[in-house]
Amino acid sequence: MAHNGDDLDDDFVLDDIVALSETEEVHDADDDIEKLLSADEDAPVNQEQSLVDKKRKRREKEKQRKAKKRKLAEDAQPPEPVSLGAQPPVLLADYLSSVQAKTFKKLSAIELQDRQIPESSIADTTQWTGSRTSDDLVEFIVKAVPALHTRLSMRTKSPGAPTLLFLTSAALRVAGVTRTLKSKTLRGEKGGDVAKLFAKHFKLEEHVKYLKRTKVGAAVGTPGRIGKLLCETDALSISALTHIMLDVSYHDKKNRTLLDIPETRDEIFKTVLGAPQVLQAIQAGKIQVVLF
């Protein structure tokens, strides 16, 4: 016999178990739909993040590869050659003798020997391990040639009588070194003026007048002009001269040093180091030759 809804008792209540199972089925269905929706929404985000991570890893690998390549290149580079001036006096004496022979090609070995710069008159600056540029010149003098530093800080007694002659190959270099040597670190409060001696823009007579009225502690110049002042005038005195510095660390546009250029090399050995009064003082140990 069939029953319909009206056949139920008025006080009928659903069993608790049946009621709960129906509710869970509804919740489970909702959860499944949410998971499907969230999966669809997260998929593009996850893919995009994956691409970002891959790019980042590629960049890191490329950075590491370049760093490794750079290090290999640095390791493969030969070490910087030792500066000419950093050689010990025994080697510098041989070097100066060899370049001097290029100037006096017609002289015999015995005649050349009479003109050589003795090893004992070449300053030993091997203790200086820094670079040799105009920026380092002040510290170089203070630490590697302390006797010169002391002299430069003393009051100059006579006009035109420097304690230092600094020889370089170019007028522009003369101007730069002149500014450097005017440092208070070297001259203190008593040191003399720093003379700038080169032919460009200055006549010989102008330098003669300047030296005769000015007390100078150092003179910076080209070999040609200093040679003329030493050999053709009485304006540049060596009465207080203790050091002659050769600027062999400076290279011109053709990568030549002061002693590589035939003209300046000849002027140095003929009219500066070769000037009779200068050569005699060098060989007597009164003047030190410094290769900077």
Image (spheres, rainbow, N blue to C red):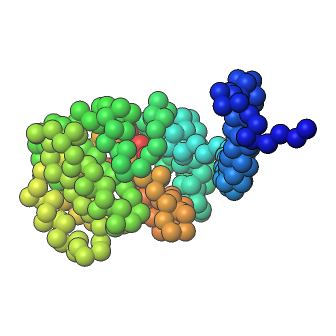
Which residue is pictured at 69% across the width and 28% down the height?
12
Which residue is pictured at 21% across the width and 57% down the height?
195
- Toward the top, the furthest residue is 16
Quarter holding the N terminus?
Answer: top right
Instruction: From the viewer's side, name the closer residue of 117 and 258.
Output: 258
Question: From the viewer's perspective, is 201 left or right of 76?
Answer: left
Q: Is residue 126 visible?
A: yes
* Residue 185 horizontal/vertical position (percent): 22, 39
Instruction: From the viewer's side, name the closer residue of 137 and 118.
Output: 137
Question: From the viewer's perspective, is 155 left or right of 255?
Answer: left
* Residue 17 horizontal/vertical position (percent): 74, 24
Residue 187 appears in which quarter of the rendering? Answer: top left
Instruction: From the viewer's side, name the closer residue of 53 and 91.
Output: 53
* Residue 143 horizontal/vertical position (percent): 35, 32
Instruction: From the viewer's side, name the closer residue of 9 and 52.
Output: 9
Which residue is pictured at 23% across the width and 40% down the height?
186
* Residue 262 horizontal/vertical position (percent): 52, 66
Question: From the viewer's perspective, is 56 left or right of 288?
Answer: right
Which residue is pictured at 70% across the width and 23% down the height?
16
Q: Is residue 289 visible?
A: no
The image shows residue 77, relative to residue 200, as above or below, that is above
- Toward the right, the furthest residue is 1
Question: From the viewer's perspective, is 21 left or right of 290?
Answer: right
The image shows residue 1, relative to residue 159, as above or below, that is above
The image shows residue 182, relative to residue 19, as above or below, that is below
